[in-house]
Amino acid sequence: MTKKAVLMLSGGLDSTLALCILREQGIEIEAVNFVTAFSCCKLESLEIARKFGAKVTTVSVNDDYFKMIEKPKYGWGRGINPCVDCRIYMFRLAKKLMDATGASFVASGEVLGQRPMSQKFHQLEIIERDSGLSDRLLRPLSAKLLAPTLPEREGVVDREKLYGISGRSRKELLELAAKYGIEEPPTPSTGCLLTEPDFADKVRDLFDHKPHYERWDFETLKVGRHYRLGPNTKIILGRNQEENLKLELLNARESILLIPESFKGPSALIVGETGEAAENKAMELILQYSKLGKSSPAPQARFERRQSGGRDFLSWPPAGAERNLESLRIGGQ
Ligand code: SF4
């Protein structure tokens, strides 16, 4: 066996420590950092990885990742986070990298019992088995509590220099961080939107209403307040200037963007089936979240409408507009 490993580098403290432990044993590290539409890498940790001489590759997940979220074999956590399936998905990709680079095993910063959704003993076993990494998945932080893996038995890794950490306490991890000179250990948050209940509501709404979703649909979920008008129509309202700009970038073939032209207020993206009724409701929502909409008597307003690269203007009030659309809202943010 070669003294080379692929390390799953999430950007958190645990995987950074796993890196330090293996580098200390002279193991060459090919680190891989996975980026999904719902989480991103932590740049500080990538810097640490480079400092410890690891080559870091960032890999974006494919579109089949979304199908996995919709129908996970092992279920969801408190949001719509399919953590066990997600880990299996990523470890399968890591195995491909292991085979392609001539590495002997895959390592991760998983800690037995630390995360209730994916790091209980039986979950670690499932992840190892279903990813095709049986006997070749090393968890240096908890290794002494788990069966010896092939690289340990073959002497590629010295098991005596690995650890037997378990549970949710960060005490031992922080002591190790100090030992390796990590002055500002990354925070323990997953940074994954799928764990957030409000975001999970939006994802479920998408699965319920759009069987042939695309990556673009998931990108829209990360921006604004969402209102469902009907099975095929949704309005997204920007919550600040940054989100208004993001909505401009997201405005695509399946959408229309309305921007207040004669006053200050949020932009609204109409997604799916558009038409006069949807536009009237989008204008109503924009006014509801602007100062002008609270004025009396009822305001006059102009909106820019952008669609398929073209632009024109709409006027308010139209005939028959409704008020109080909060009951249409998806999620709480
Ligand atoms: S928290 Fe998100 S990225 Fe992490 S394992 Fe769960 S689903 Fe995957």
Image (cartoon, grey):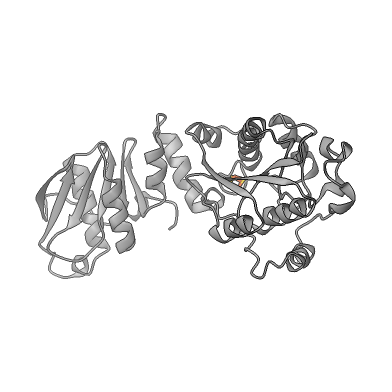
Classify 18 as above or below 175: above
> Of residues 84 and 272, which is closer to you in this image?
84
The quarter of the displayed image where residue 217 is located: top left
| Quarter of the C terminus within the rendering | bottom left
Q: Residue 69: x and y, percent?
A: 54, 37
Residue positioned 77% across, 63% down in the render: 176
Relative horizontal placement of residue 4, taking residue 315 as reference (left or right)? right
| Relative depth, front residue between 292 and 152 | 152
46 left or right of 281?
Answer: right
Location of residue 71 by image quarter: top right
Residue 306 pos. (x, y %): 17, 47
Where residue 80 sits: x, y (%)? 55, 44
| Residue ID at (14%, 55%) | 303
- Left or right of residue 115: residue 295: left
295 or 171: nearer the eye? Answer: 171
Residue 118's place in the image compared with 297, above or below, is above
**Residue at 76% in and 41% down:** 3
Q: Is residue 171 above or below residue 323?
A: below
Q: Horizontally, is 171 left or right of 79 in the view?
A: right
User: Where residue 16 sits in the image (x, y, percent)?
Assistant: 68, 56
